[in-house]
Image (tube, coloured by chain):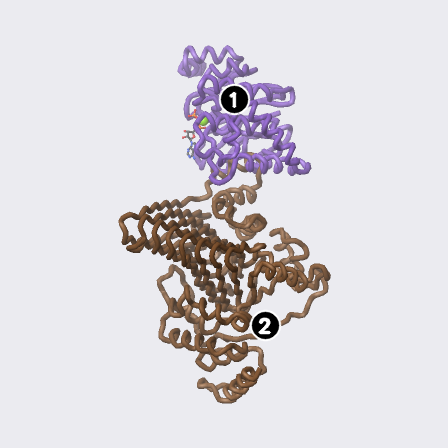
Amino acid sequence: MLSVKNLHASVFDTPILKGLNLEVNAGEVHAIMGPNGSGKSTLANVVAGRPGYEITEGTVEYQGKDIREMDASERAGEGVFLAFQYPVEIPGVSNMAMLKAAINSLRKYRGEGEMPAAEFLQLIKEKAALVEMKQELLKRSVNEGFSGGEKKRNEILQMAMLEPTLALLDETDSGLDIDALKIVSKGVNALRSPERAMVLVTHYQRLLDYIVPDYVHVLSDGKIVKSGDKSLALELEEKGYSWIEQELQQAS
Amino acid sequence: MTEVVEKNRDLKELVKREYKEGFVTDIESDTLPPGLNEDVVRIISAKKNEPEFMLEYRLKAFRRWQKMREPEWAHIDYPKIDFQDISYYSAPKEMPKLESLDQVDPKLLETYEKLGIPLEEQKMLANVAVDAVFDSVSVRTTFRETLSAAGVIFMPISEAVHEHPDLVKKYLSSVVPVQDNYYAALNSAVFSDGSFVYIPKGVRCPMELSTYFRINEMNTGQFERTLIIAEEGSYVSYLEGCTAPQRDENQLHAAVVELVAHKDAEIKYSTVQNWYPGDENGKGGIYNFVTKRGLCKEDGAKISWTQVETGSAITWKYPSVVLQGDNTVGEFYSVALTHNKQQADTGTKMIHMGKNTSSTIISKGISAGHGQNSYRGLVKILKGADNARNFSQCDSLLMGDRCGAHTFPYVEVQNPTANLEHEATTSKISDDQLFYLMQRGLSEEAAVSMIVNGFCKEVFRELPMEFAVEAQKLLDVSLEGAVG
Ligand SMILES: Nc1ncnc2c1ncn2[C@@H]1O[C@H](COP(=O)(O)OP(=O)(O)OP(=O)(O)O)[C@@H](O)[C@H]1O
Ligand SMILES: [Mg+2]
């Protein structure tokens, strides 16, 4: 589904990704871990098409299509979703209004008509219940005055509403209390399916107890330096990243 | 009748004389040659067959105007206006009707489409003949009947001076004195036409006066004059303007609007202004110098101004409220957008005189391109105004880095019990916001539109429902090409 080959990318002219390879198939969940500043968010943003994140070398294919020239909204239309590490506030725009516009934009991109209002209301009620989000938050301005945890939950609500094919979750677990973590995981697991794929960026093994990944990768200095299954996450938790760096040094 | 004949004779006498400037004019001509002097004022009054008191009023205003100077304090920059190079009277012209929308400039139709203006209204706006059912004359008659059944007077002010001279005499310039400012004096001397509204005691006006206005004659000329009086316990909502782009050969517009609210009366005045802003270089746009003021004359009165200003090359406009009675309320909600080379210096004045008076100011300025947007506001609390309250919020949104936003809030407090709050913010449409919305599937234009509309929300919700929707679309159209 997602095929990233030898990806070199710069953020406002600073090279960050330096030859990254990643293959994600439908139905799979991949976890990406790695030290601060190693380029995890950069990878997610490059795949989602954030302006200013420039690919200098390598390819990014999604569902067999080269998406490098598509803008962010086209990629969203193709089914790519990014849950932001730092969700953005949009004053004066209600959460509901934003979701409605988003759903209808995606439908338009796919050549479908607008979602009938009643269907939309039913859907949002259902999904808000799934992530245990209060009705009151739906009417408030997007992320404005939301607590850190509410913002993260809102990202999952949006994901549940938009039903992406490829979901990139950037540290959705950071800042969540244990109950919220369970709720968010429930939302993510509900979306797992043989047609979908997910890439989770996280610092904590804990999340992977709730969302069990098929693969775990370690990103360091702009490259994936080690891949494994869930046990790799446990090993990292125990030994830290320095262990991998030492291993790499020995190898070279 | 004899009076009219006499007047006409005077007029003939008058025009036979040579103008001081050395030109002769013909009474039958539709447009006076450029220039302004006492004779021109006399001709205007005579052409309209006005009663004597109106001529005196105009002459008095003209004499004051001659002694005044054009204000220069506003944060706007434009070539000096030659007031002797403007024609001050032009009879309303009947444009030949077009047969179908096919004959209308497709670009104009495209804009109507984008604004979501219904087909029949598009026809009226574009001067296309309409079906009998939609004929503005017949609809107008129905409206008139509904209004007069309620005792509401709503007519052109040029008719009101004949039909209700006592009311006009009593209230005209009772809120904006002729000498108030340069443009108000000019308007008083030469005003063309405008609306007169009178709501009797205890009457809630049975319709938004917008509904009427939109199909009414829109060509009231460059010096518009409006007077609205709400008697005790009455209510009226009046909407001026139109989202459809309006062009005019006259570059200078100087309107005066006066509102009088008696005890417990409420007047809600909304404006959507979309005069031609000029091209990308600001060439040819309208200069809009407007004086709008409301008087909460007695206890418990309330006046709110809501404006969406997207047009004009230059906007100079400060709708104000004088809170004279006790427990009176003044409100000002404004969205002003400047794009390309547009300049706007707009805001409000809230003058607190009575006790327990309160005012609210919400101003949203949007600048794009090289647009310059200034908020200028005065909150004045006079000695006797115990427990006055004001809340002011001035937010500016910048798009791009060649535009500007400026705020000039003035406060004068003469009573220590006053409670004033002021908030001001300046923000940019951030790349993060754009990316966030685009990542959710919105196109770049839709994302910008959503952010801008969110920014203006507190103002839009004050507009009559159907107009709020149009106003949103108007902002989208006005901001086309502002990003990217
Ligand atoms: N706009 C920018 N301009 C310059 N450098 C940037 C910019 N944005 C990010 N970077 C740099 O790119 C590097 C990678 O950042 P990124 O956000 O991808 O790291 P991360 O792996 O997600 O880290 P964290 O775990 O802290 O979230 C960092 O060194 C960061 O400072
Ligand atoms: Mg990160």
Q: Identify the colour of chain A in the image.
A: purple
Secondary structure of residue under mark 1 = strand
Which chain's colour is brown? B
Whether residue B435 sits left or right of residue B176 in the image: it is right
Q: Is the residue at mark 2 in contact range of ligand 1, meaning its CB lies under 8 Å from it?
A: no
| Badge nearest the viewer, 1 or 2 | 2
Name the residue rendered at 54%, 86% in the picture: B6
**Vertical position of residue B14 compared to residue B291: above or below:** below
**Vertical position of residue A5 compared to residue B406: above or below:** above
Q: Are marks 1 and 2 on the same chain?
A: no
Measured from the top left, where is residue B225 in percent x and y?
A: 49, 67
Which numbered disc covers residue B92? 2
Depth order, front residue of B352/A61: B352
Q: Chain of mark 1?
A: A
Q: Residues within 10 Å of mark 2 (few under 14, many from 20)?
A: few
Whether residue A103 sits left or right of residue B422 in the image: it is right
Per the image, the residue denoted by label 1 is A200
> On the rendering, which quadrant does ligand 1 occupy?
top left
Q: Which corner quadrant holds the N terminus of chain A?
A: top right
